[in-house]
Amino acid sequence: MTRPAFVTTDDLAADLRPLGVPAGGVLMVHSSLASLGRVLGGAPAVVRALLAALGPAGTLVMPAFSPEVSDPARWADWTGEALERARAALPAFDPDTTPTTMGAIPETFRRWPGARRSAHPQVSVCALGPRAVEIVAPHALAWGQGEGSPFARLAAMDAALLLLGVGFNRATLLHYAESRVPHGRRKTRRIPFGEGARREWVEVPCIGDDLDTHFPPLGATYVAAGRARTGMVGAADAVLASSADLVAFATAFLGSALAVD
């Protein structure tokens, strides 16, 4: 099959509908713009296609993570005076201006008119639509991907999960599933608040970082079992799943896999 020279908003929306994107439903999207091929209009065209497939009664959700709102010692090789200067100068989280590192599509969606963003400095989500407010708030600092978080609420309302040109190692709902496993991996988040002399560091518990050991085989097993729908959106491989079903499957899978780690 000849790959088209480009894809449009209408092309993408036409690919999304037969995949099973639920008109009027809630859709959580993890994405890669480059995977789609040449999109006329870039990331805004993709957001428009997703909104068109959902319709006006639907609610679109994307991650808006900002992992650099954290101790620079965890993501840079600075030491001594340079590290202390970075710790003092690092901007605190601002839901209106702090960018996300999740890619061009989520960053575009973060700035979309009417989009709401949750308050977590490191693992926020953005949502637009009738259910946006109930999805984004509250978002406590501790266990930001666990019970009581937007991810738990997405699973409870059985939002659809769309992986658009990315793998299951990008599916944050799997972190929520791991939070339900008593022997799941854990870590401490270190978050800066305030500026200058008012700078304060807060430490809170959360789920571990490892994305690549168990999540890809979990996803492959899930798809092979026929529990997700697959297809092409533009030039990208796409997977659509029920969040409630995926979380139930992942909780059992990780419960077994992590028991022998």
Image: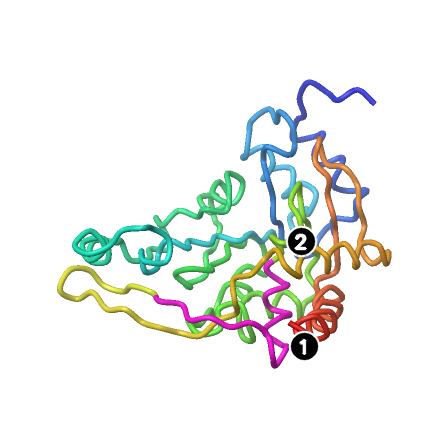
Vertical comparison of 176 with 212: above or below: below
> From the image, which quarter does the N terminus lie in?
top right
Q: Tell me how far mark 2 sits from mark 1, CA to CA.
A: 21 Å
Around disc 1, counting alpha carbons within 10 Å, would you say few (fewer than 14), some (14 to 19), or many (20 or more)? Answer: few
Residue that label 2 marks: 168
Q: What element carries label 2?
A: helix
Is residue 178 part of the magenta span, yes or no? yes
Left or right of 141 on screen, residue 182: right
| Disc 1 secondary structure class | helix
Q: Nearer the viewer, residue 67 or 124?
A: 67
Which residue is painted at 50% across and 57% down in the image?
125
Residue 10 percent coordinates (x, y): 69, 30
Tag 1 residue = 259
Q: What stretch is highlighted in magenta?
A: 172-190
Q: Where is residue 35 in the image (x, y as percent from the top left)?
A: 64, 34
Q: Position of residue 218 (x, y in %)?
A: 73, 60
Task: Give the residue displayed 62% in from the left and 24% down from the top.
Answer: 38
Residue type at numbered disc 1: Ala
Say left or right for 246 vs 118.
Answer: right
The quadrant in which the C terminus is found is bottom right
Q: Is residue 215 magenta?
A: no
Q: Which amino acid does label 2 sit on?
A: Phe
